[in-house]
Image (cartoon, rainbow, N blue to C red):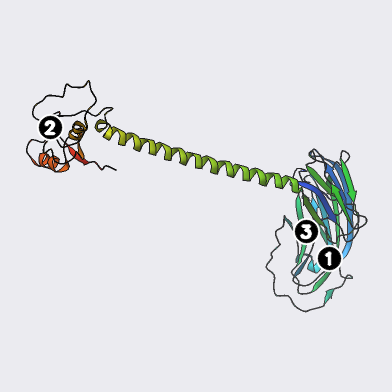
Amino acid sequence: MVLGPSSSRLMQASSVFVEQVEVRDDDKRGVFLYAFSEKPELSYQTNWSVSDYVIVRSYSRKGFSFWLNKGSTIHMRWEAPTSTLNQLEVVMTKGERDLQTLLPEVTDSTDFLALHEPISGKEVKYTIEEDDKYYIGVINSNRRSIIMRVAINVSATMYDTTKAKSKCSTETGSCRLRLEFPNTHYVILTTPNYGNLAGWYIELSFIARVVTYIAILGFIVIVVFLILKYLGACEGENTIIDTEVTEVRQVTETDPIMPAKPIPYTYGTGEEDDDSGDSSSSEELYDAKLCVICYDEQRNCFFVPCGHCATCYDCAQRIMEGENKVCPICRRLIHKLRRLFHS
């Protein structure tokens, strides 16, 4: 992570998911880490400046990286020999994008433009519109290296840290800040003004709150289980409904052939046995099961749609093959013939 002099960098770190934040600074320059429950305001202004001589080799560039917040301003002035000043270009980029500039092939020349040549300077000013990383670079298009003087003045906007819930410092090289559950939502890194243009890089680590992720995983497992259970229950209900519909259809087709009491039928006379006072003899029961046409075979089929079971299958076939396809009992037209199997 890139910082600079008097930097103030804000990051979101909800204590629901993050238990601790650790900062490592190998240079031990004293980075401060603050924790907040509410987002602080950009209300503090600080100024810092630095001036130094830099060497920009032929057909190359020299640059510096900073972290600046919205509202900050940068004023930069550079001085170089008059003969080469127009061949120096100052650029500024925002974000992590690398500056890509087409330059002539780099030479191995070690010639320098001496400082005793006439010196002149240029300056530029930038206003920062968004919190981000910024890079300021000087591009040398000369065939010789240049020794130039660079002066940078920055008016940096800082976050107000007076309402921080807790803080720690990297004066010993690293520090770890525990976030208070569940109200901490922001952390801020601030740096002092150490008066150096060299880059300053630190390591920032977020240590997860394991309990939260276990709870989320358990919730997802429960939801998946309930969904699968619901889908299984729906499939079971559909199977039961299909079975009941099939049974209803079977009962509807076969219901007329299963009366509550066996009724003996006669063919041709149209008379019924009036003797119902005594129980039927074995001979009558046997006759009631015989075909009413041939009186040889048992009744083993029924007619659709009337459902009467009065003949054997062979006699029923002869009725179906004849011109008058009617039931011998009710005289209804026969549509289909179904065989019965006795167990």
**256 and 175: which is toward the camera:** 256
Residue at the right extreme?
A: 172
Q: Evaluate whether residue 125 shows in this view.
A: no
231 displayed left or right of 248: right
First of labels 3, 2 by sequence position: 3
Q: Describe the element under mark 2 as helix, strand or loop.
A: loop
**30 and 21: which is toward the camera:** 21
- Residue named by callout 2: 328
The amino acid type, in three-letter code, at marker 1 is: Ala
Report how far apart the C-alphas of labels 3 and 1 lie in the structure: 17 Å
- Residue named by callout 1: 80
Q: Nearer the viewer, mark 3 or mark 1?
A: 3
Where, by quadrant of the figure, is residue 182 drawn? top right
Q: Position of residue 323 (x, y in %)?
A: 6, 38
Q: Describe the element under mark 1 as helix, strand or loop.
A: strand
Please give the name of the residue rendered at 11% of the width and 30% of the height, measured from the top-left corner. 267
Q: Position of residue 238 (x, y in %)?
A: 43, 39
The amino acid type, in three-letter code, at marker 2 is: Pro
Q: Position of residue 25 (x, y in %)?
A: 87, 58
> Counting other residues with Cα less than 10 Å from the Cα at mark 2, is it few (<14), some (14-19), or many (20 or more)?
many
Q: Describe the element under mark 3 as helix, strand or loop.
A: strand
Q: Which mark is residue 136?
A: 3
Please give the name of the residue rendered at 77% of the width and 72% of the height, measured from the top-left corner. 58
Q: Nearer the viewer, mark 3 or mark 2?
A: 2
The C terminus sits in image quarter: top left
Cβ atoms at labels 3 and 1 below 8 Å apart = no
**300 and 11: which is toward the camera:** 300
Report how far apart the C-alphas of labels 3 and 2 lie in the structure: 110 Å
Residue 341 vertical position relative to residue 91 in the rendered view, above or below: above
Q: Evaluate whether residue 77 shows in this view.
A: yes
Q: Position of residue 190 (x, y in %)?
A: 86, 49
First of labels 2, 1 by sequence position: 1
